[in-house]
Amino acid sequence: MSTSALITSIADVEKSARERLPDYAWAYYSRTSADGQTYQDNLEAYRRYRLIPRNLRDVSIRDTSVTVLGTRLDIPVAIGPTAIHRFAHPDAELATAKGAAAMNTGMVLGSFANHSIEEFAEAVPSGIHWFYMLFYKDRRHMKRQLDRAERAGYTAIFLTIDQSFQPFFVDKRIGPRPYPVPLRFPNIFDVEPPHAVGSTEYRDCLAAAVKEPATWEDVEWVRDNTRLPVVLKGVLSAEDARMAVERGVNGILVSNHGGREQDGVPATIDVLPDIIRAVGGKAEVYVDGGVRTGTDVLKALALGARCVFIGRPALWGLAHNGAEGVEQVLQILTDELSLAMARTGCAKISDIQPSLVVHQSYYGIPAVRAVQMSKY
């Protein structure tokens, strides 16, 4: 029996990845901020929501397709920007992109990718490509990056706003040092520095180029200097969501960086309804963090997300079996979502309405009151 035949859940893929990845790679992908409270809460929060199925509906055929930023995806699950796929597979982001393309869904190419904007697009011409750009001190450099993405056929620009200061991949336990696999970041510099990635010298070059922290004025500048839709990733505040809409942002990705930045912030699924209300339909809203099952996807869509993004599960799939492993992760989530849709009376994504899900407190509070009343 093949290894892939033994994989039936995202948890299985995670276990396989842990067995295959070297310790330094697993440590980097698994890193959380502080004691990992936010990372754990991302996972546990989905379990606090309960589904209210509708029955006696014709769900013999289910359509999981959705439109994101004007592009049709076969599934409402896309791959968010993550760094250094080279740790998981020699083909790095190219393999991840092939897995996404096989499922006709989108992928955000990270700035800290081992392949350039152009290499990525040329390797998977049928793919749905979005680009995550850093904020730079040199606006001319930013304009060149935006133009490169447009020429290469990318259809959106993602900006991360919850990372005011970059960690630049330094393990505090061992300090700056070159990594044990060859890395390059061709989407950061016009000409790459002559230093090993991870070294103190390379880190100094990054610090000299990247603007920290960025401001709303930087977002406005990007919006005014590209023809592509702009998505802000890292929004947790309803007020920030309103400000983004006022500045013409096209999409908002509710995210806490997978618990890798500020610990102690809320789980993304808990914040999502507030963001939906604040945006008021003036921009598309997505969510990431903690998605591990198709039922999680269903809950996120019911609470208002147009699409969910995954990070670590895609990297686990890449480590498990390259492009086929990424495709397998997406297929597992798709199969689970389709089954959950059938069991809750949803034949298409638009059938997934807010009434499908309630927070567990909806049942917990009456139960407490019943116990209290029984004492009298």
Image: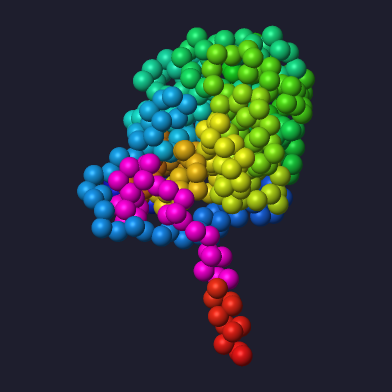
Residue at (40, 47) in percent of width and height: 352
Residue 348 part of the magenta-drawn span: yes
Tell me which corner region of the image, top left, top right, bottom left or bottom right, holds residue 280. Answer: top right
Q: Position of residue 281 (x, y in %)?
A: 53, 35
Residue at left offset 61%, top offset 33%: 233
One can see residue 222 in this view: yes
Q: Nearer the viewer, residue 261 or 68?
A: 68
Check the image and tell me how it is coloured: rainbow
Residue 8 locus on image (x, y percent): 34, 51
- Whether residue 266 is situated above or below residue 203 in the rendered picture: below
Horizontal and vertical percent position of residue 313: 48, 43
The residue that appears at 53% across and 60% down in the rendered structure is 359
Is 262 displayed left or right of 157 in the figure? right
Residue lying farthest to the bottom in this orientation: 376
Residue 183 visible from this viewpoint = no
312 inside magenta stretch: no
How many numbered marks are there?
A: 0
Q: Quadrant of the C terminus?
A: bottom right
SS assignment for the magenta stretch, majority: helix
Identity of the residue drawn at 50% across and 38% down: 309
Q: Quadrant of residue 355?
A: bottom left
- The magenta span reads 339-365
In this image, 155 relative to 98: left or right?
right
Looking at the picture, does residue 45 appear above or below residue 109?
A: below
Nearest the viewer among 190 and 250 is 250
| Residue 196: x %, y % from top left | 66, 23
Establish if 373 lies above or below 327.
below
